[in-house]
Image: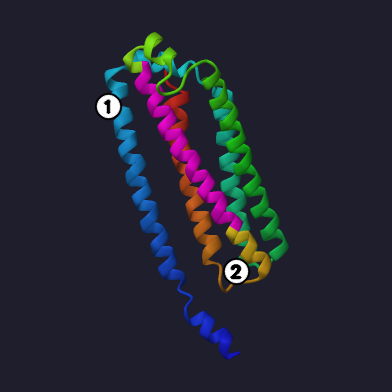
Amino acid sequence: MSQVIHHDAHYDPEGSKIGMWLFIFTELLLFGGLFIVYAVYRYLNPEAFEMAAEELNVTIGAVNTIILLVSSMTIAMSTTALQKKQKGTTVVLLEITFMLALIFLINKYFEWGIKFEHGIFPGSEYMTSELSQGEILFYGLYFVMTGLHALHIVVGMVIMGVALHRIQKGTVHPERASLLENAGLYWHLVDLIWIFLFPLFYLIS
C-alpha cells in the first residue's frame, strides 16, 4: 500500500496537461509561421498556385480528411471509455485510431509516390526546367508542410502505442489517465492542422 501511495505522489496530471498545452502552442506557432509564408507566396503567385494545385489528388486529400476526423472521434471516445472503466473498449478504440493513422500515412505514401514518378519533388530536373517559380514554391511548401504533418502523425502513433501498452499493463487507468488524455490533445492538434492544410493545397480556386 505504501508503494502505491509513493508512486501516486509523483503523479501530476495538471502539470503534464499544462506541459502538453505549451507544446501545442509552440506547434501552432510553427505551423502558423508556415501558413503566413504560404499566404504571402500565394498572394504573389495566384495563377501558378492554382495550376500546381490541379496536379494534387483531391479524392485522396478528402479521404485523409475523413480518416483524421474519424480518428479524432475514436481517440476521444477511448478517453471517455477509460474514465468509465471500460478497459477493453478503450483498447479497441485506441487500436482503431492507430490503424486510421497508419492508413493516412499509407495514402500519403502513394500520393507522394505518384508525384515522384512524375518528377515532381524538390530539386528534380522536371521542376527546375519545366515549372514556373510560383509552381516550384507551391510544391516546395506542399512537401515541407505535408511532410512535417506526416512526421507529427508518426509521433502521435508512437504516443498512442505507449499509451496502449500502459493501458494493457494497467499503469494507465481512470485515476491515472493523463497519458491518454495528452495523446488525445496532441492528436486533435494533428487533425486541426490537416483541416487547414487540405483546403489550402487541394481546394484552391
- Classed neighbour count for the residue bearing mark 1: other residues with Cα under 10 Å, few (<14), some (14–19), many (≥20): few
In the image, farthest residue toward the bottom: 2
Q: Residue at x 49, y 59 (%)?
A: 182
Q: What segment is highlighted magenta in the picture?
A: 135-161
In this rendering, the answer to whether 107 lies above or below 119 is: below
Q: Residue at x 31, y 28 (%)?
A: 39
Name the N-terminal-most of marks 1 and 2.
1
Which residue occupies the foreground of this view, 172 or 71? Answer: 172
Q: Is residue 111 visible?
A: yes
Q: Where's the N terminus, which quadrant?
A: bottom right
41 in the magenta segment: no
- Separation of residues labelled 1 and 2 (CA atoms): 45 Å
Is most of the magenta stretch helix, strand or loop?
A: helix
Q: Residue 205 appears in which quarter of the rendering?
A: top left
Q: Which residue is mark 2?
A: 172
Q: Find numbered disc 1 in the image and state the secondary structure of the residue it sits on.
A: helix
Amino acid on which the number 1 mark rests in the picture: Val
Q: Residue at x 58, y 24 (%)?
A: 59
Which residue occupies the foreground of this view, 83 or 124? Answer: 124
**Residue 26, how many percent across, how many down?**
34, 51
Amino acid on which the number 2 mark rests in the picture: Val
**Residue 99, how many percent across, how many down?**
66, 45
Q: Which residue is mark 1?
A: 40
Q: Are marks 1 and 2 in contact (CB under 8 Å)?
A: no
146 in the magenta segment: yes
